Image: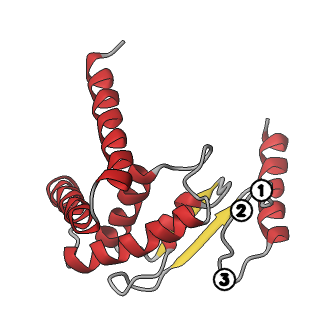
């Protein structure tokens, strides 16, 4: 196994374990400081590697804490979706990139869709399109949804690609 990959997996395991401990063993003030620090680390990474930055880390921390509580309450971080580390990363990436359009294929329960599209004053308004052949497991109800459009879009592309082969 690639040693770099196993080091990343080990670090990810430690972060995940620490986040689980923080829910039960760390007071709210310390937890907020840890999230603030994590967003700061992501901000530094985005600046260095992408040339984008998060302009207000304090407000981003407050928004993230509000959104992650909603995600946990509604079961968005269960098996089959993203976990809290990925949720934080997508949320921070949205703040740094300030996209005009976000497209997600395979929304399943909606955990990554929620992380990227949840409202915050730190991000401009943008268009988000999520589609999946089966929208039944979706746990969030975004505005202007249409399950028939998502299914037709997927089936139309599938039919076109089958004709091309």
Of the numbered discs 3 and 1, the one sitting upstream in the chain is 3
Numbered label attached to residue 154: 1
| Mark closer to the observer (3, 2) | 2
Of the numbered discs 3 and 2, the one sitting upstream in the chain is 2
Q: Residue furthest top?
A: 1
Q: Are marks 2 and 1 in contact (CB under 8 Å)?
A: no
Which residue is label 3 attached to?
Answer: 143
- Image coordinates of residue 118 in percent, x first then y, are 49, 75
Please name the residue shown 23% across and 57% down the image. 38
Label 1: which secondary element: helix
Q: Are marks 3 and 1 in contact (CB under 8 Å)?
A: no
Dot 2 surroundings within 10 Å: few (below 14), some, or many (20 or more)?
Answer: some
- Image coordinates of residue 87 in percent, x first then y, are 43, 57
Dot 3 surroundings within 10 Å: few (below 14), some, or many (20 or more)?
Answer: few
Label 2: which secondary element: loop
Q: Nearer the viewer, residue 78 or 147?
A: 78
Place residue 121 in its image quadrant: bottom left
Place residue 156 in its image quadrant: bottom right
Question: What whole-number distance in Å separates the C-alpha atoms at marks 2 and 1?
Answer: 16 Å
Numbered label attached to residue 138: 2
Please name the residue shown 61% across and 59% down the image. 75
In the image, taking residue 5 as reference, residue 39 lies left or right, namely left
């Amino acid at each position: 196994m690639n040693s770099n990959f196993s080091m990343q997996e080990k670090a990810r395991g430690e972060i995940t374990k620490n986040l689980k401990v923080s829910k039960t063993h760390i007071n709210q003030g310390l937890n907020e400081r840890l999230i603030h620090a994590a967003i700061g680390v992501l901000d530094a990474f985005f600046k260095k590697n992408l040339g984008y930055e998060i302009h207000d880390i304090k407000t981003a921390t407050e928004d993230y804490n509000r959104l992650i509580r909603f995600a946990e309450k509604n079961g968005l971080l269960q098996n089959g979706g993203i976990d809290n580390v990925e949720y934080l990363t997508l949320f921070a990436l949205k703040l740094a990139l300030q996209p005009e359009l976000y497209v997600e294929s395979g929304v399943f329960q909606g955990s990554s869709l929620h992380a990227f599209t949840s409202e915050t004053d730190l991000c401009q308004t943008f268009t988000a399109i999520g589609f999946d052949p089966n929208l039944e497991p979706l746990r969030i109800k975004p505005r202007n949804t249409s399950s028939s459009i998502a299914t037709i879009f997927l089936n139309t592309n599938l039919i076109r690609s089958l004709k091309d082969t």
